[in-house]
Amino acid sequence: MGIGTYILVSLVKIAIALAILLTAVAYTTLLERKVVGHIQNRWGPSRVGPFGIWQPLADGLKFIFKEDITPPFANKPLYMLAPIIALTTALTSIAVIPIGPWIRVGSINTPLQIADVNIGLLIILGVTSVGVYGVALAGWSSNSKYSMLGGLRASAQMVSYEIALGLSLIGVLIYTGSFSLRDIVDSQAGTWLGFIPKWNLFRGQFVAFFIYIMAAYAETNRIPFDLPEAETELVAGYHTEYSSMKFAMFFMAEYANMVTVACLASILFLGGWSGPVFGPPIVQSLLPVFWFALRVFAFMFIYIWVRGTLPRFRYDQLMAFGWKFLLPLAIANIVVTSLVVALK
Amino acid sequence: MVHMTPTPVLDPSDDKTMVLNMGPQHPSTHGVLRLLLEIDGETIVRIMPDIGYLHTGIEKTCEAKFYQQVVPLTDRIDYLCPMTNNLAYCLAVEKLLGLEIPPKAQWIRVMLNELTRINSHLVWLGTHAMDIGAMTVFLYCFREREDVLRLFEAVSGQRMMTSYFRIGGLALEPPLGFFDRVKNFNDRFPPNIDEYESLLTSNPIWTGRTKGIACLSGEDAIALCATGPTLRASGVDVDLRRDKPYSGYEKFQFNVPVSHDGDVFARYVVRVQELRESQKIVKQALEGIPEGSVKADAPHVVLPDREKMKTQMEALIYHFKIVTEGFTVPEGEVYMPIESPRGEMGYYVVSDGTAKPYRVHMRSPSFANLQALRKMCEGRLIADVVAAIGSIDIVLGDCDR
């Protein structure tokens, strides 16, 4: 494939991936409102279109038309920059996430992934770490006490849980021996006894999966770890002073992060897109994408379910949980996994 | 001149601390409570509550109204338990008048008061749980509260500002089928309490957020004039319904839940137990409603029935006199405390022998209980302040009057 075709194919893939991601983000908000609504004995959005399916569009329009207020004593450049950092980093990580095997369109054979890099996992970890800057800067530059407390909480929480999150992935890496997300998925192909899939989750990494879920909830500031934006304590945390599209950008970043985290969970622990494949060629190439989307959906659903069930931790309890429980557990998991692999 | 500075100012005592203004517009200060917090990181160094943002001057307004016109004002004091306020005021004036209330009116008053307690505790449980992040409990509680409000609407025509009790009895007979509706609600309520508890009581996050938090010892609680569940959760067994029965409470069997831990969790447990006890009292009240009238036989005080007013000359005259001139109350003063969902709700009424009260003062439980906040919160974290406010169960209308 020539360089021109390569760039063209990449641009098309970027456009499609962005469109899918942003739609997923928009409709995750609707899903969340509907599911939480039904958990809580109410309907959720039901006015804009049948079952409220145009609600995300209405919300988006509303955000665009809202007045964009900048507090008078805010540090304006950083105040503007913070939501941009938050959203761009959240969207960037999707670039290395594979959503299916190779696909053939005409004479072009290309992976269902924007960039198949051999350090994909490291890129995602790195980019999400940069995302902390968005939150921390938002909290600091707003020049509001609630924002500052929220920003401090968020930075401390995300940095702490980043460690547990990173360590929980090492077990998987020991098994696979590669940072490439595609290699990790390929290594989980096949089954035992014909029906137990060889997912990392079933290969002894369930402790890691548990740690990953906990840390992921904390990374994305979701209940029970939503302290940075605990509305009953800090009003809205780091985005208290933000309005209009700037607020929407934080909002989108949060949901894009949720999608990324769910994709990573599917790839690392749940076998990526593995699943029965049948039918004509076009169905055969798209069915894996469906299996992948199903896992992501299930993960998002659990996110929302947890939100409808649990109360919130307190700040010191959250830190204690991360450092005194998750971190030792993650290290123990690495040791045990290494021993198992070494003794094999 | 403290009263000359309407908005108190708290200056940080040194360079390391910061003053955070929490409220009056804050999601978890339960209305318009304003707190000035001096914080070191997230730790509270000093806390200064500022009240008065919902001051309506009801006490003064009462002095310009006839005795019977004060009843609707009392609804608006503690708007989560309007019937309790109605009852405390009516009992106070009835004591001055020396009126005998028919047993049926007393039973219905007790029944509606316990429904009011359920209503108030449901709002408390929902908002308290939401403050700690459990949003679903809030909507579950409001689902049942809606049923209670429908009962109030059926009996009084209003969901919140009921004004159903009158000096000398009730405004009206309850409508047909009302007791069946109450029974229906009351029978299916206990499983709902289990549902709330299943989401909270044994949830490790919930217990982590509430156990050992914002402790108040029994001595401190008494010294700070705390009453109601806030006092009983600190191990002091006082309940006016049992200790100084009013409106026929001595005829009912019920337990007074007491806990000795004095923390947020203890106050939670005590109130949830009270929900169950209230349900039992309503059940007993439904089983033995006496026959008879719901109004005292005192034509100079109690408005005649509409039917009589249209047909009897004397009733029409009384009606005209009461509506235009009110009724006079013998000179004297009275203090009538009753057990509201929040604690001791006392009405102090002074009469100078005219048709308008000389003075009406409410001893409101929220105001007294709020004093305990400082004791509970200093040295703790911001998140604990939110838990503590929720656990005291303040209503700012009650606090500011």
Image (cartoon, rainbow, N blue to C red):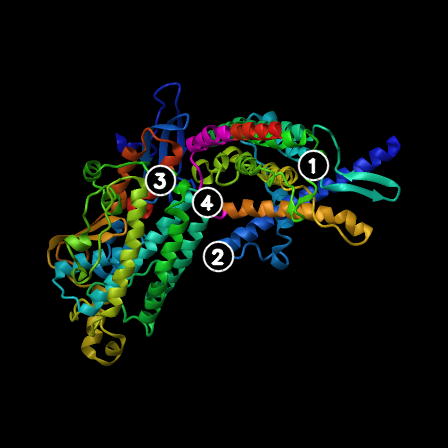
Same chain shared by disc 2 and disc 3: no
Q: In the rendered structure, find residue A187 and report the number of the disc placed on it.
A: 1
Residue B309: give x, y in percent of width and height: 24, 76
Circle 3: element type = helix
Q: CA distance from mark 2 to mark 3?
A: 26 Å
Question: Pointer 1 and pointer 3: residues touching (CB < 8 Å)?
Answer: no
Q: Answer whether residue B58 is visible to the viewer in this image.
A: yes
B194 with respect to B375 (left or right):
right
Q: CA distance from mark 1 to mark 3?
A: 46 Å
Q: CA distance from mark 1 to mark 2?
A: 43 Å
Q: In the rendered structure, find residue A310 and report the number of the disc placed on it.
A: 4
Same chain shared by disc 3 and disc 4: no
Same chain shared by disc 1 and disc 4: yes
Q: In the rendered structure, find residue A41 and report the number of the disc placed on it.
A: 2
Residue A27: give x, y in percent of width and height: 63, 48
> In this picture, which residue range is highlighted in magenta?
A308-329
Q: Residues within 10 Å of mark 3 (few under 14, many from 20)?
A: many
Q: Amino acid at mark 1?
A: Ser
Depth check, front residue: B234 or A285: A285
Q: Main secondary structure of the magenta part?
A: helix
